[in-house]
Amino acid sequence: MAIELRNATFRVGAETHIYETSLTLEPGGFNILLGTTLSGKTTLMRLMAGLEKPTTGEIRANGKNVTGVPVQQRSVAMVYQAFINYPSFTVYDNIASPLKVAGLNKIEIDEQVHRFADLLQLTPMLGRLPKELSGGQQQRTALARALVKGADLLLLDEPLANLDYKLREELRDELPKLFADTGATVVYATTEPLEALMLGGHTATLKEGRVVQFGKTSSIYRKPATLESAEVFSDPPINTASIQKQGDKAYLGEFVSWQIPDKLANLPDGNYKIALRPHHLLPEGKGVKVDGVVQLAEISGSESIIRINVDGNIWVSQTHGIHSFEFGEKACFVFSSNHCMYFGGDDRLIDI
Amino acid sequence: MARIRFKNVMHAYPPPKGQKPVYALKEINQVWEDESAYALLGPSGCGKTTLLNIISGLLTPSEGEIYFDGQDVTHLPTSERQIAQVFQFPVVYDTMTVFDNLAFPLRNRGMDEAVVKQRVDQIAEMLDLTSSLKKRASGLTADGKQKISLGRGLVRSDVNAILFDEPLTVIDPHLKWQLRSKLKELHQQIGVTMIYVTHDQVEALTFADKVVVMYDGTVVQVGTPIELFNQPKHTFVGYFIGSPGMNILPCTIDQGQPVFHGNLLSTSYPVSSDLSGKLEVGIRPEFVAFADDGIPVAIDKVEDLGRYQVVTVRHESELIKIVVKEDQPIPSENPKIQFNRKHTEIYCDDWVVEGDGHE
């Protein structure tokens, strides 16, 4: 099902939860809503589902205006962060429940339940009650119940947030294929940039009730249209700073400067901003050197995460290997100017 | 502050009628050194919360003893153990101000009001709560409330240890960074023993000096983050630490070297040929690389994760994951792979095989 928000807003009293939004999701596509808590992900989903009616604007499904059509009359399934199952039903009956409501006969129900139990590796647990399952199995049951409905629009609100990270890793691997097989249009909300990259598809970056950018997930990561979009799509936080452009040079503070690309050199001199991903700022190597004071060094498995104060900006370096620093130590970090993203006064990306 | 020691600690919850007890904790012998920061890492159900509750005295173990600096505290109630605990969800007194919330554990112990003020101000500053001290706790966001919970855990200077049970689960990823940094900074400043339970490897590895990995009721490895990454002692550690986890592949041993589906591999140490049990070779995705010569594979999947790519390849029926740099091309014709011999480990019945002269 193609789903479209056309100039949709959502207000509760004087408070605006969603500012005017227009967004078109292709039928059968996998779409991610990426943003922090309270950025509007859940509200957007509720608008798409018909659980809320937009204050102004329209919701359209397959080109038809469905604004105000209640959720029961739409082909929608939703999965929440908290695993919701019927506690007194077995896994089998949980998965079967939407089919019973739809009035399918026993043979059809049995066939469908087994198909989805198989897909989600729940077959050995069909006779168990939800409380006898692990968290991952409970969420798989909730997923199976949503999938078995065969809805055209599948909405998932941070479905993996309550699971062990290893289980999340496994499900992230399986889910995109599973969804592709159903043919449904999928909308998936997450707060984690890495999860968005793992899942692929298309991503909408959200901030404070606005869709900042929508496009192919990897393109948004590589070419964020605005500084805001780059910030939403970065964990650890992306490094930003104001720079002075003079001729073909960029100046960061008094002592750091580098050659800028031709396309940028042709723009008027003045203030610009840069953004640099943490894994492009390194404790050694060639490139532009910046001096900073180490705030914190964390070591995570095979990599180090170092926070430094560079001229009043807190920057993060995320690097392979183990690098030990003391709190308050002065250190020199480097980056390649090729990895800099440049933004104009309006915070829009300068495409170079 | 204290050194905490577990001696032969085991615990079984009361079984349903007519059934044998199942041990949530199998024999644990473990020392928690004074002033160190530990993370207790493992999947749900591995026994980590049980272990934490045994330290705090909420549970008495079915067998074994616990010592604080040599004193047997096995049967000492929680109130006499001087332990501060921070839970997954914020526990705050909504009607009190932030100041009174933070002061509560100190006033409870009849501390002088001047000392209370000094400690509370100090903790509030560390947690960026100074400007909200006079506000009612009920008006704060979930993050703000959890900061108060953390502050209450940290405010006493006379505790033996501070226990954290997944304290950042409810916090937004962007804020997690800040709070984790704060906790680490605080540990460096106040130097009290901290034990931090989590199922999140990133949290565990960034917070702790030493990580205690638990699996199925036992401690499978205790080590620094680097040791856990470089030398997993158990296949579970290899799988659980690292994302993606270690590739674990079936093998046989021929003349002291592993053989994987007819491909002779090499390790940095010779392996005895008369091992019996399930034999596997373990290699992290970071240490597998495309090469001109090596094991022929078919490419199954390429995932672009931004700063690196994860490539899944297939040899016979086995899937192998490889971590490849963001700008490195993936070979399209007859790809072959090589394992870095320095990082190739052999496992027998899930435990690492130590070769002669193996570091």
Image: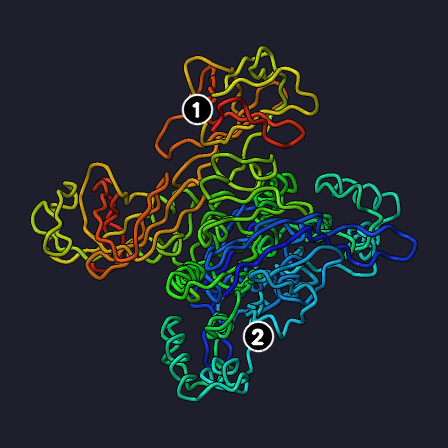
**How dense is the environment of label 2, judged by Cα within 10 Å: few (below 14), some, or many (20 and up)?**
some
Please, is residue A97 above or below residue B283 in the view? below
**Quarter placement of the C terminus of chain A:** top left
Residue type for callout 1: Ala
Name the residue: 46% across, 26% down.
Answer: B288
Q: Of discs 1 and 2, which sits in the foreground? A: 2
Q: Is A112 left or right of B210, judged from the image as shown? A: right
Question: Residue under mark 1: which chain is it in?
Answer: B
Looking at the rendered structure, the secondary structure element under dot 1 is strand
Residue A3 location, quadrant: bottom right
* Residue at the front extreme, as displayed: B70
Looking at the rendered structure, the secondary structure element under dot 2 is loop
Percent x, y for residue B120? Answer: 42, 80
Mark 1 or mark 2: whose residue is earlier in sequence: 2
Name the residue: 68% across, 67% down.
Answer: B58
Q: Is A347 left or right of A154, judged from the image as shown? A: left
Q: Is B203 left or right of A285, judged from the image as shown? A: right
Please, is residue A12 above or below residue B6 in the view? below
Report if residue A1 is visible in the image: no
Instruction: Look at mark 2 in the image and give the residue it sits on.
Output: B91
Q: Is B346 left or right of B330, judged from the image as shown? A: right
Residue type for callout 2: Val
Give the alpha-carbon distance from disc 1 to disc 2, as whole Å.
Answer: 49 Å
Please, is residue B161 above or below residue B28 in the view? below
* Residue at the left extreme, as displayed: A247
Percent x, y for residue A33? Answer: 49, 55
Percent x, y for residue B142? Answer: 51, 72
Q: How many marks?
A: 2
Q: Are marks 1 and 2 in contact (CB under 8 Å)?
A: no
Foreground residue, A336 or B154?
Answer: B154
Foreground residue, B190 or A72?
Answer: B190
Instruction: Look at mark 1 in the image and give the residue it sits on.
Output: B289
